[in-house]
Image (cartoon, rainbow, N blue to C red):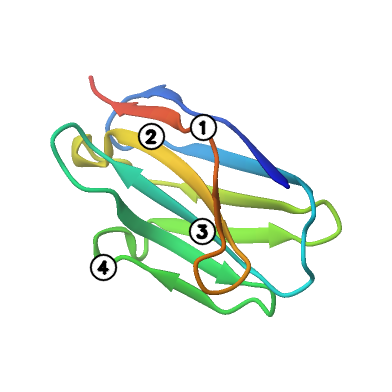
Amino acid sequence: QVQLVESGGGLVQPGGSLRLSCAASGSILSINTKGWYRQAPGQQRELVASITSGGITNYADSVKGRFTISRDNAKNTVYLQMNSLKPEDTAVYYCNLNQGPRINYWGQGTQVTVSS
């Protein structure tokens, strides 16, 4: 089994920054993809960014140039640095670990609110 524990959410003003962290523990395979998703009220969960164990990254168009995903394989941790935050970035952010087809694990979610 795998556990994902997120941290770093909170309230920030527009234009501000936050850094999310997600630490994984349990049966972690060496080859996997870690990602961050978000879900705003009344909307579907969407991919924000992902990074493979080899370091290949993928970003949603809405966050390109503002968010950066990174990972520390030794610590089984993935980070999401969010800069130039906008009110439309407000959502619950979920950490995801994918270890193969239909093998997905999710964190409990952390609230990010961008408001003045």
Q: Which residue is mark 4?
A: 61
Which residue is located at x 68 percent, y 60 percent? 71
Is residue 34 found left or right of 63 in the rendered image?
A: right
Residue at the image point whose x is 61% and y is 50% from the top? 79
Q: Nearer the viewer, mark 3 or mark 4?
A: 3
> Callout 1, which amino acid?
Gln
Q: Residue at x 77, y 67 (%)?
A: 29
Q: CA distance from mark 3 to mark 2?
A: 22 Å
Tell me the element at label 2: loop
Circle on res. 35: 3
Q: Is residue 65 shown above or below 24?
A: below
What residue is disc 2 on? 16
Real-space Cα separation, disc 1 to disc 2, in angstroms? 24 Å
Label 2 sits on what residue type?
Gly
Label 1: how many Cα within 10 Å (few below 14, some 14–19, many 20+)? some
Question: Circle 1 sits in a helix, a strand or a loop, which is it?
Answer: loop
Q: Amino acid at mark 3?
A: Gly
Question: SS at mark 4?
Answer: helix
* Sequence-earlier tag: 1 or 2: 2
Q: Residue type at mark 4? A: Asp
Which of label 1 and label 3 is nearer to you? 1
Disc nearer the start of the sequence (1/4): 4
| Badge 1 or badge 3: first in the primary sequence | 3
Could you say where residue 116 lies in the image, as x and y percent from the top left?
Answer: 23, 19
Q: Which residue is mark 1?
A: 108
Identify the mark nearer the N-term, 4 or 2: 2
